[in-house]
Every structure is written in structure tokens, then in C-alpha cells.
Image (spheres, grey):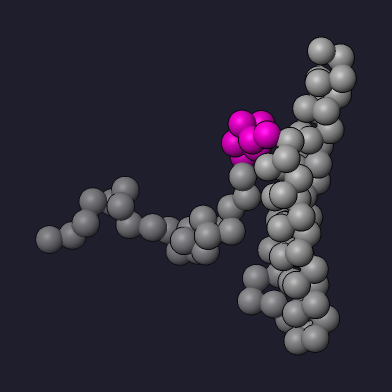
Amino acid sequence: MLAPKSSIPRPGALAFNLFRPMDADQIRDLSIAEIETRIDEEEEELDELKFQHAIRGRLENPMLLRTKRRLIARLKTIRNEKEATEETA
């Protein structure tokens, strides 16, 4: 018997879900200290990806570089929003 259509992943869907960044709502639920920790972790991962890209010349998924950069920017933006909110409160 075949699996229901909704349970069959699309080609490439699994790879996308593995590297899917956090949503802004998920980040807003974190504290400033947790966000700063996450920024450090993501920047280290980005540095490692850049190093691999420079050495090998190719990555399995070069879109990871852009995804990581955008996630770091999102984390920093929300951290700045939270800090500004705390200053006015």
C-alpha cells in the first residue's frame, strides 16, 4: 500500500529542512544572552563554511553561506530591538 501523499517528502525538501533557520518569532522568545550565544555559534559555523569553501572551492550546499549570513543578521536585529526596548522601559 502506498503512503499518503502528504507524508511523501518533495525532492530537496529534506535538505531544506535540515538547514532551515529559526523564525523571527522563535528568536524573539529567547533572552538577549541566549541570542548573543547563538550569534557566536552561528558566526563560528559561518567562518568554518567560508574556510571550507576557500580550501575546496566548492561546498555541498553553497546556499548555506547566504542562509547563515541572513540568520546572523536576523539575530542581531532582534537583539538590537530587545536592547532598545529595555532602554526605554
**Which residue is found at the position 18% from the left and 60% from the top?**
2
Q: Residue 56 location in percent, x, y?
A: 75, 86
**Which residue is found at the position 61% from the left and 45% from the top?**
22
Name of the residue lying farthest toward the front: 33
Q: Quadrant of residue 60?
A: bottom right
Up-down relation of residue 79 to residue 71 (above or below): above
Q: Residue 84 location in percent, x, y?
A: 86, 24
Whether residue 25 is visible here, answered yes or no, is no
Up-down relation of residue 3 to residue 74 (above or below): below
Q: Quadrant of residue 80?
A: top right
Q: Which residues are magenta?
A: 23-31
Q: Residue 26 location in percent, x, y?
A: 60, 36
| Residue 24 falls within the magenta-colored stretch | yes
**Which residue is found at the position 81% from the left and 13% from the top?**
89
Please state which of residues 63 and 55 is positioned toward the viewer in this rendering: 55
Please state which of residues 41 and 56 is positioned toward the viewer in this rendering: 41
Please state which of residues 88 and 68 is positioned toward the viewer in this rendering: 88
| Residue 71 falls within the magenta-colored stretch | no
Left or right placement of residue 59 versus residue 69 in this view: left
Image label count:
0
Q: Residue 23 location in percent, x, y?
A: 62, 39
Is the N terminus in the top left, top right, bottom left or bottom right quadrant?
bottom left
**Which residue is found at the position 70% from the left and 50% from the top?**
38
Whether residue 59 is visible here, answered yes or no, is yes
Name of the residue lying farthest toward the top: 89
Up-down relation of residue 16 to residue 28 (above or below): below
Left or right placement of residue 71 versus residue 2 in this view: right
Name of the residue lying farthest toward the bottom: 56
